[in-house]
Amino acid sequence: MLAAALAVAGLFVTDYGIDPDLWLTGLALGFLALLAALDPWLHRKRAAGLATDANLDAAANDLVKALRGQWNEECRARGLSEHLLDLHWSADEGEPGHSDAVVGSFLRSSRMVFLGEPGAGKSTTVMLLTLGMLDRHADGSPVPFLLPLSTWDPDEEDVRTWMTRRLYEDHPALRNTELYGSYAGDLLVEQRRVFPVLDGLDQIPADRRADAVDRINRAFPHTVPLVLTCRADEFAETGAHVVAAHVVQLQPLDHEEIAGYLRSTSDPVAAARWEPIFLHLRGEPDGRLAEALSTPLAVWLAGGVYAHGEPSELLDRARFPDRRAIEDHLVDALVGSAFGDRGAAHQARASQVWPRDRAQRWLAFLAREMNARGVRELGWWDLRRSVGRTWLAFLGALVLGLIGGFGVMWLMAYASTPDLAPITGLGAGLAVAVAALYASGQRAVKPRLGVWRSLLVVSGVLGGAAGLVFGALYGLSAGLVVGLGIAVAVALRFALGTTAELSHPSSPQWTMTRDRVAVWTGSLVLAVVFGAAAGLVFGPYQTGMVGLGLACGLMLGFTLSVLHLRWWWYTVARIWLALRGRLPWELTVFLDDARKLGVLRQAGAAYQFRHALVQDRLASATRERVRSSA
């Protein structure tokens, strides 16, 4: 930014005897010298090798800070810091225990498998275990990394490769080779500095589970810490076992635990309404209602649904003949009561009151899309999968081509060569569109230290090419201004792509903000560049050229900045789906409010439904069924 500011400032002092060409040439050479001094590719002794032990120690310590902040925030969002059921579990040796003993048990065995029925609290238990291990982390000890297994395809990726990819996706600052060295994420996994907490083996297709367990055993031998969760019946069906693991079975809640939790989380009036239910549970401890409320999820749902309602309706055997009917009713009522209620929105500190029927329709669309892909995690960058790949690429390329082409044509139309405006604009638009089509099919790559990590080479080549074109058309000064500006923009984009904020907790908003900052910073730099060039070349002869250059530079800078960023393709998909009524226009706000209202939860940089039962119910229920039960 300093180089761009000096370039513009220098143009205003040329009346005092400073030749503008000499000023800009010296500034360009000085900027390239600065890049050479900072360029990691040229620092062969430091940059050519892999990350050192000191690099990895720093990365692990910063990762602990990020994960601790992330899971502490999620615990607060779920209300676990205020009200937490004391889960009962039994080990394969038959020893009873409680949730506060899980960390101690893990410290003794270091490999654990948590089994239980749906809603039994497996995910919450391993999240609290992860947080407990992070709080007890000592230098040199492995860092727990909690991941949903629904995002792993054993046929496509080795489990360690998948884990490494997720590290980079959730914590992109690991790409900062200046701070953490090359391949920091890869080495954290390979050197066992990060150990897996794998949630939801049952979310992998049944015919792949046994193979998945075998791959996990081979990737993480008995000396490596490991945590795995699965539904009890599904784990038994695999016929597999995790080597040297301590197997824990989460037990159902009894009627006293259910009553104690609901009384503690209700006001006196609401607690009194629960008394007929408590009497029924005491009289029929093995009945349908006791079975339905035997899990922490169901008790939490019931407490929220009937905070201001009448729970005695659950005693209606005709309406609720079995456990499934009660669970479906509670899930439907959760979604129905979370939206359209001003009091609920105010209590949850949601940004607005979302219309109930539309909120249910939007969530049902997301649930169906996730089920169709077989995932339990909603990353904002994956929204593009809800639009056909070809259609998405066409829409994104068309819009960028129109913006870039119009920006170039508009500037050329008022330049000294207006006859070239149509052909120049068309050529620029086609070039941008082709680049966008190419970028739409590219996946993010892991950081490497080849020539493409060179500040000097990449910035110098791209800036020099643009400068030669403009210099040939409009003279040396214009070429130097544009070339220097392009070099500054590329170097800035490079710097923004390797953030040092690894210790910042990962979240959907944070990862999206990184992309947005890169987009608008690059756009503004190129706007200043083209504004300065237009003022230098055309200012003495035509009025308004500086403003026109700023506007055209902003458009062209935007098209060049977004090509390889996930934010652009997310935005295209979001707008297209909003136009069709599938999703709201303010999608990020809606998802954050749904989390505050208890329908979604956050896992790193992605969202999940509060439980798989909620996702599956929304995916399968028709709009009429949801409305009738709300």
Image: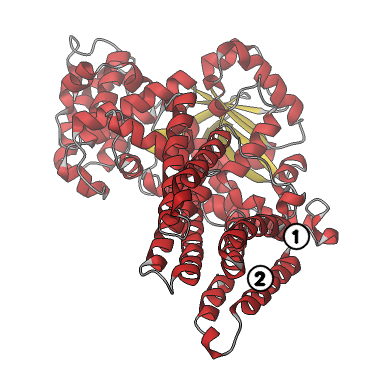
* Disc 1 residue crowd, few under 14, some 14–19, many 20+, Cα 10 Å: many
In this image, 80 relative to 131: left or right? left
Quadrant location of the C terminus in the rendered image: top left
Identify the residue at the far bottom of this view: 16
Q: Is residue 614 above or below residue 323?
A: below
Dividing the picture into quadrants, the one containing residue 323 is top left
Q: Residue at x 50, y 71 (%)?
A: 536
Q: Nearer the viewer, residue 460 or 340?
A: 460
Q: Which amino acid type corresponds to the residue marked 2 in the rendered image?
A: Ala
Total tally of numbered discs in the picture: 2
Quadrant location of the N terminus in the rendered image: bottom right
Q: Nearer the viewer, residue 597 or 406?
A: 406
Dividing the picture into quadrants, the one containing residue 601 is top left
Residue 28 is marked as: 2
Q: Is residue 232 above or below residue 261?
A: above
Mark 2 touches mark 1? (CB < 8 Å) = no
The Cα atoms of the two marked residues, 2 and 1, are separated by 20 Å
Tell me where residue 218 appears, x and y as whole percent: 76, 25
Q: Nearer the viewer, residue 533 or 195?
A: 533
In this image, 53 relative to 391: left or right? right
Q: Residue at x 41, y 68 (%)?
A: 546
Residue 40 is marked as: 1
Q: Residue at x 59, y 78 (%)?
A: 20
Choose the circle earlier in sequence order: 2 or 1: 2
Tell me where residue 31 appears, x and y as whole percent: 67, 71
For the question of whether residue 544 can be seen, the reply is yes
* Disc 2 residue crowd, few under 14, some 14–19, many 20+, Cα 10 Å: many
Q: Is residue 535 above or below residue 449?
A: below
